[in-house]
Amino acid sequence: MNSLTVPNDILLEEVAAVLDEGREAVITPTGNSMLPFIRGGRDRVVLRRQDGMAAGDIVLARIGGRYVLHRVLGVSGTHLTLMGDGNIRGTESCMASDVIGTVVEIIRPDGRRCSPGKGRVWRALKPVRRYILAIYRRLI
């Protein structure tokens, strides 16, 4: 199968348009900010527009001209705090209107599909996440 690499600003604008029509979109994220649950360049994610976000949801958001696929840490009205599962510090803030879509399914390279879950245990492990990620990165 041939692949085509398209710049994020072009691709994700089209993804937003598809989601606005009420359809789903499947993308292959890049980067390691969502390790160990989403492996950049290998896993694919199914995105859908959903009303209301809650802590634990994984969302694709436009923040300051760039796009991030991160987990929602907290919701305060229409204000969201995001952080990648593979990050050990640093958060992003955005408005609910900046969210393009929510991950509803993760597709592994072998075709298996799994639910993204809410990451409750992983979020609770934040103080020791650095060590777990260091071991994980050596194993993959």
Image: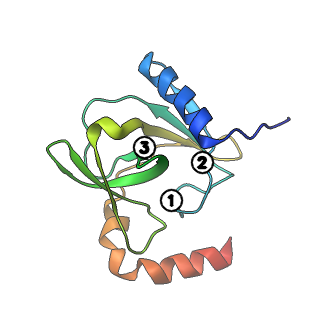
Q: Position of residue 79 (x, y in %)?
A: 21, 47
Residue at (39% x, 28% y) in the render:
49
Residue 1 horizontal side relative to residue 139, left or right: right
Q: What secondary structure is found at the residue carrying circle 3?
A: strand
82 horizontally vs 103: left or right = left
Secondary structure state at the residue bearing disc 1: loop
Q: Report if the CB atoms under discs 3 and 1 are less than 8 Å apart.
A: no
User: In 3D space, how far apart are the residues under numbered discs 3 and 1 (Cα atoms)?
Assistant: 16 Å
Disc 2 marks a residue whose amino acid type is: Pro
Taking the view exactly as shown, the residue that stands out farthest to the front is 65
Image quadrant in which you'd find residue 45: top right
Q: Amino acid at mark 1?
A: Met
Give the residue at mark 1. 34
Numbered tag placed on residue 62 in the rendering: 3
Gap in angstroms between the C-alphas marked 2 and 3:
14 Å
Outermost right residue:
1
Q: Position of residue 118 (x, y in %)?
A: 34, 52
**Residue drawn where x is 63% and y is 48% of the image:** 43
- Identify which amino acid the numbered label 3 is placed on: Arg
49 w.r.t. 69: above or below? above
Residue 109: image x %, image y %? 70, 47
Q: Given this view, does label 3 or label 1 mark the residue nearer the observer?
A: 3
